């Protein structure tokens, strides 16, 4: 294999922007009102984002973690309650519940899709369970059929962590059409971004109005008398961020189209490499935005996986280790942890344990590259693994 065949592919950069963002920022600047209560950018973005996702309402907030926290709060999560979360996820999924005073209960995920396991979820339901949080890992929608039935039968609401799932669909239905609250992130690496930011979509007016109050210190939209009707915090998004997100939303669909075309090619090439298993796909997820190009090194130790990621980065790929199992993070145990040990939880989460050791992901900008670049990426992965 020649050195040239291993040269780093010149993948597209992220974030992507053009004169649309510049024009929108100037418009936000020149309107003279930079706060959402006086400007028009946040309101416009919320309408556009809700429409794109098939939701009745959307509320823009400061970041994705606050989106989760607000979504849980309006559903009654707080001290004395429990929230079921996948054990394999970014820790905001659990900490949003824990910072409200609730206990986060980790359950295992499916080793093929990396999404929360419905049977494990059902087994974890108890008298204190107030919400179930499926995470649409890397854009793969969790089994919303099984989870919706479980939710209806148990009378426990779902809160979709859709931080990876902008534009995703499940059997032709968009995330906002699945009948439950969903939380999104616009952090710098996400599928659309303003550096930071988040949004919550709601299936009904009542939840939306409650969330609006709580995201604005409990204060009604037109209040002049400091009538703080609920407790709350300041989770309001500013006008400049909203103007950028409006531009980002206009190109999201085209970017998803490209990633949907590239992932079958790249995943097929990766699966030809001995020891590599790409994230699977539940075909009921008929539009996957592919926030990550994920795969695992079957049977690898955490140390070997970490060394492989370092070498992939050295070869110019935007590679990262998979998330730590949340119960293997010190922060998980600071507050709102279940009355179990790490070993207890690990014993019932074998798929999470495997992903904790073996998972690697490539930034979604990888999948915005050309077909030839997908070949280059696979060659580099094969070469690094052969060396290792």
Image: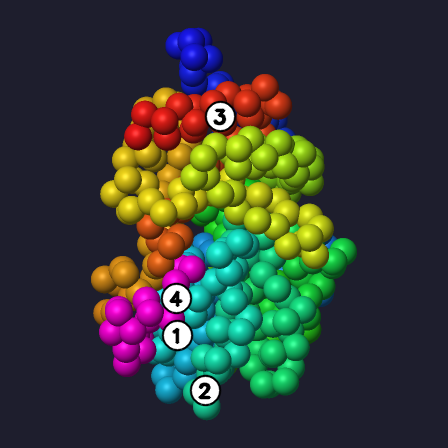
Compared across the picture, whether 316 is left or right of 185 comes to: left
Residue with the mark numbered 2 = 126
Q: Which label sits on residue 56?
A: none
Q: Residues within 10 Å of mark 4 (few under 14, many from 20)?
A: many
Which one is earlier in the sequence, the residue at label 2 or at label 3? Answer: 2
- Quarter of the figure with residue 59: bottom right
Residue with the mark numbered 3 = 377
In the image, which residues are magenta? Answer: 336-352
Residue pushed farthest right? 172
Find residue 294 and report its horizontal and vertical position in percent. 48, 43
The residue lying toward the viewer, choosing from 169 and 209, is: 169
CA gap, disc 3 and disc 4: 31 Å
CA gap, disc 1 and disc 4: 12 Å
Instruction: For mark 3, give the secondary structure.
Output: helix
Q: Is residue 292 visible?
A: no
- Residue at 58%, 61% (x, y): give it: 142
**Residue depth check, mark 2 versus mark 4: number of the one nearer the observer:** 4
Compared across the picture, whether 182 is left or right of 294 comes to: right
Which one is earlier in the sequence, the residue at label 1 or at label 4? Answer: 1
Which one is earlier in the sequence, the residue at label 2 or at label 1? Answer: 1
Instruction: For mark 2, give the secondary structure.
Output: loop
Q: Answer yes or no: do the residues labelled 2 and 1 have beta carbons within 8 Å?
A: yes
Q: Which label sits on residue 349?
A: 4
Instruction: For mark 1, give the secondary structure.
Output: strand
CA gap, disc 2 and disc 1: 10 Å
The residue lying toward the viewer, choosing from 18 and 371, is: 371
Residue pushed farthest front? 274
Residue with the mark numbered 1 = 105
């Amino acid at each position: 294999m020649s050195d040239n065949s291993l040269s780093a592919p010149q993948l597209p950069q992220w974030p992507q922007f053009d004169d649309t963002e510049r024009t929108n920022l100037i418009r936000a600047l020149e309107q003279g009102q930079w706060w959402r209560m006086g400007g028009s950018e946040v309101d416009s973005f919320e309408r556009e984002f809700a429409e794109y996702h098939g939701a009745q309402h959307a509320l823009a907030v400061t970041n994705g973690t606050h989106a989760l926290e607000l979504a849980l709060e309006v559903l009654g999560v707080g001290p004395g309650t429990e929230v079921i979360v996948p054990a394999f996820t970014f820790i905001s999924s659990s900490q949003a519940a824990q910072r409200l005073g609730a206990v986060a209960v980790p359950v295992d995920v499916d080793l093929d899709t990396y999404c929360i396991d419905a049977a494990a979820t059902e087994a974890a339901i108890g008298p204190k369970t107030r919400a179930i949080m499926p995470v649409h890992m890397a854009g793969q929608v969790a089994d919303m059929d099984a989870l919706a039935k479980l939710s209806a039968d148990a009378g426990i609401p779902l809160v979709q962590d859709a931080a990876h799932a902008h534009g995703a669909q499940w059997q032709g239905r968009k995330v906002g059409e699945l009948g439950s609250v969903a939380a999104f992130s616009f952090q710098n690496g996400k599928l659309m971004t303003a550096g930071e930011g988040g949004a919550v979509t709601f299936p009904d007016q009542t939840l939306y109005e409650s969330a609006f109050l709580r995201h604005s210190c409990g204060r009604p939209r037109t209040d002049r008398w400091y009538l703080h009707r609920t407790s709350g915090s300041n989770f309001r998004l500013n006008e400049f961020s909203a103007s950028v997100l409006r531009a980002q939303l206009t190109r999201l669909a085209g970017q998803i189209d490209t990633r949907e075309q590239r992932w079958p090619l790249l995943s097929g090439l990766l699966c030809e490499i001995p020891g590599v298993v790409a994230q699977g796909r539940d075909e009921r997820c008929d539009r996957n935005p592919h926030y990550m190009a994920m795969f695992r090194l079957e049977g690898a130790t955490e140390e070997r996986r970490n060394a492989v990621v370092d070498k992939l980065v050295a070869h110019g790929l935007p590679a990262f280790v998979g998330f730590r199992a949340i119960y293997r993070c010190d922060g998980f145990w600071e507050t709102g942890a279940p009355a179990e040990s790490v070993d207890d939880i690990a014993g019932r989460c074998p798929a999470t344990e495997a992903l904790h050791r073996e998972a690697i992901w490539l930034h979604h900008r990888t999948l915005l590259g050309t077909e030839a670049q997908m070949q280059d990426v696979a060659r580099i992965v094969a070469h690094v693994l052969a060396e290792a």
